[in-house]
Image (spheres, rainbow, N blue to C red):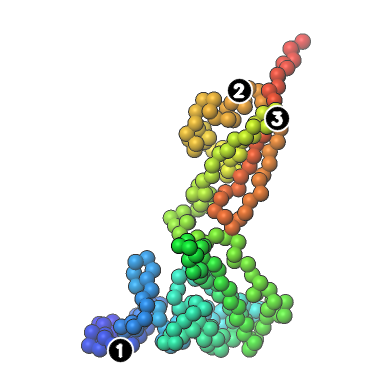
Amino acid sequence: MRAFLADIKAQPSEHRRIDLGAAGVTVVLTYVGPRSGPTFSVGGSPVPEAPRSVEEHALFRLLDEKGRKYRKAGITHPVVIHVATERNPSVSRFYSVHTVPHRDAVAAALRKHPIISGVVLMWLESPVPMFGLAPPRQPRLEAFVNDDAPHPLTERMRAVLPRMRFDRVDYGELWNEWEGATTAEQRLDRLGGSMSYRGTKDGFAVTIPADLLIQALGSTSSTNLIDSEYRVDGSKNPFRRARSEGRPVVGITLLPHEKRLRDPQMVEIEFGAPTSLLLQAKR
């Protein structure tokens, strides 16, 4: 490692690469020298992902690792590897003539590892802003088939791969909505959702997130979720009002939901006209 850094210091314009596998770690360091083109950054740090050879390409390194693993596993059926990336500059429909295209990296990996029957690559692409507004990023899909695989894909499999749908989610400007949310409950909490109210012929209807109803039914807390979530109390809580007025539930409707949006699934609960409760006296 010291020699690697010393060589860079002595000749900073030269391209260098070191594989630390001999030291017992799966790390490959690449120094690409001064860049004359654009510099990509992720999380505030420069990304040294400008592969000048197939072996340096992130896709080839990943598929090479998978290929060596599956080759030793004695697999007797087709193997398809799915790869998804968010902001890797080496995976794009547009690339510099000074770097290796991702298609060449995948093709080289398939030649080296025939055990891989196919590769599905998905990445996110930012559309050109319109009128100063940045549209949500769009998923791009590319499928690769290995005709020399010992267990090749059937014609039906080949037809299905390019038709896989990844556009049912709004990826937003940056896919960081779930950052720090490690459980499904935490993600549902982030969706939030408003409470709405409308009058009906005999009463009124209240719309709330379906998840809030599930929380209320499964909660062990003594705190009223409607009061705490929407900062209402007393008669301002429509459910407390409905109960105090003796209004029965006359309808529960799960409203249509577009999964690609960040809005939560909503449910409408409708209350009817007040009903007097008749108590039967003991005989």
Q: What residue sits 28% from the left and 87% below the top?
A: 13
Residue type for callout 3: Lys
User: Image quarter for residue 270?
Assistant: top right
Mark nearer the N terminus (1 vs 2): 1
Q: CA distance from mark 3 to mark 2?
A: 19 Å
Mark 2 burial class by Cα count in 10 Å: few <14, some 14-19, many 20+: few
User: Residue 14: which disc?
Assistant: 1
Which of the two marks, 1 or 3, is nearer to us in this view?
3
Residue matched to label 2? 244
Residue 238 visible to an observer of this rendering: yes
The image shows a total of numbered marks equal to: 3
Confirm or deny contact between disc 3 and disc 2 (CB under 8 A). no
272 to 51, vertically: above or below: above
Rendered residue at 41%/87% (across/down): 98
Q: Earlier in the sequence, mark 1 or mark 3?
A: 1
Amino acid, disc 1:
Glu
Q: CA distance from mark 1 to mark 3?
A: 79 Å
Per the image, label 3 sits on a secondary structure element best described as loop
From the viewer's perspective, tell me whether residue 245 is left or right of residue 177.
Answer: right
Q: Residue at x 42, y 83 (%)?
A: 51
| Residue 254 rendering spot, x and y as whole percentages | 67, 44
Where disc 2 sits, the SS reads helix
Which label belongs to residue 156?
none
Q: Which residue is mark 3?
A: 201
Residue 142 x/y as whole percent: 58, 77
Residue occupying image coordinates x 57% and y 49%: 264
**Mark before the other along the chain sequence, 3 or 2:** 3
